[in-house]
């Protein structure tokens, strides 16, 4: 099940941010209070993933996480589709560490194409890859 993020989801989201190498705790608050969009994926009453994005004609997907044991079950795709639908966007852009091959494969399967490398994007100096998809 996919649904909007609510204030009561804060603890579960903070725990899920541990699945990401580069998580921003402030994004959880921005998804709850705006202006960011947030969606939760749950399975049998348990939160298994979330997506947070800045809406606009181009949606910027800021974070997408699914717990390892729930991956490859369509949660990530459904989260992304829900965000894009809610934003009524023309394009989606996502940033991921260049070396995160699993994320790169996931986004490629969803029709994303790389268009930019941002050297030293992350606080530890890691390069970022930006990908986009037209809707």
Image (spheres, rainbow, N blue to C red):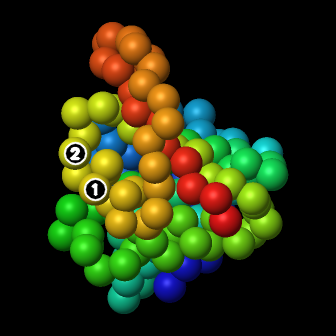
Q: Which numbered marker is on residue 105? A: 1
Looking at the image, do the residues carrying marks 2 and 1 touch, with CB atoms under 8 Å apart?
Answer: yes
With 130 as the anchor, is 91 left or right in this view? right
* Crowdedness near tag 1: few (<14), some (14–19) or many (≥20) residues, C-alpha within 10 Å: few
Q: Secondary structure at mark 2?
A: helix
Q: Nearer the viewer, residue 104 or 122?
A: 104
* Crowdedness near tag 2: few (<14), some (14–19) or many (≥20) residues, C-alpha within 10 Å: few
User: Which residue is depicted at the point 44% across and 42% down?
Assistant: 114
Q: Nearer the viewer, residue 2 or 26?
A: 2
Residue lying at the far bottom in this picture: please name it: 44
With 72 as the anchor, is 6 left or right in this view? right
User: Which residue is depicted at the point 75% across and 60% down?
Assistant: 89
The answer to whether residue 28 of the structure is visible from this angle is no
Q: Which residue is mark 2?
A: 101
The answer to whether residue 100 of the structure is visible from this angle is yes
Residue 107: x %, y % from top left: 39, 57
Residue 85: x %, y % from top left: 71, 72
Residue 25: x %, y % from top left: 51, 35
Residue 97: x %, y % from top left: 33, 32
Q: Secondary structure at mark 1?
A: helix
Residue lying at the far left in this picture: please name it: 69
């Amino acid at each position: 099940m996919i649904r909007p993020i609510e204030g009561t989801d804060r603890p579960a989201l903070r725990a899920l941010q541990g699945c990401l190498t580069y998580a921003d705790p402030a994004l959880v608050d921005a998804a709850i209070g705006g202006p960011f969009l947030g969606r939760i994926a749950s399975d049998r009453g348990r939160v298994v993933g979330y997506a947070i994005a800045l809406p606009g004609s181009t949606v910027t997907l800021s974070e997408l996480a699914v717990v390892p044991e729930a991956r490859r079950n369509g949660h990530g795709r459904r989260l992304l589709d829900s965000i894009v639908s809610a934003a009524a966007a023309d394009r989606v852009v996502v940033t991921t560490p260049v070396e995160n091959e699993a994320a790169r494969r996931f986004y490629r399967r969803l029709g994303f194409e790389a268009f930019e490398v941002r050297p030293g994007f992350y606080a530890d100096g890691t390069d970022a890859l930006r990908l986009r998809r037209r809707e």
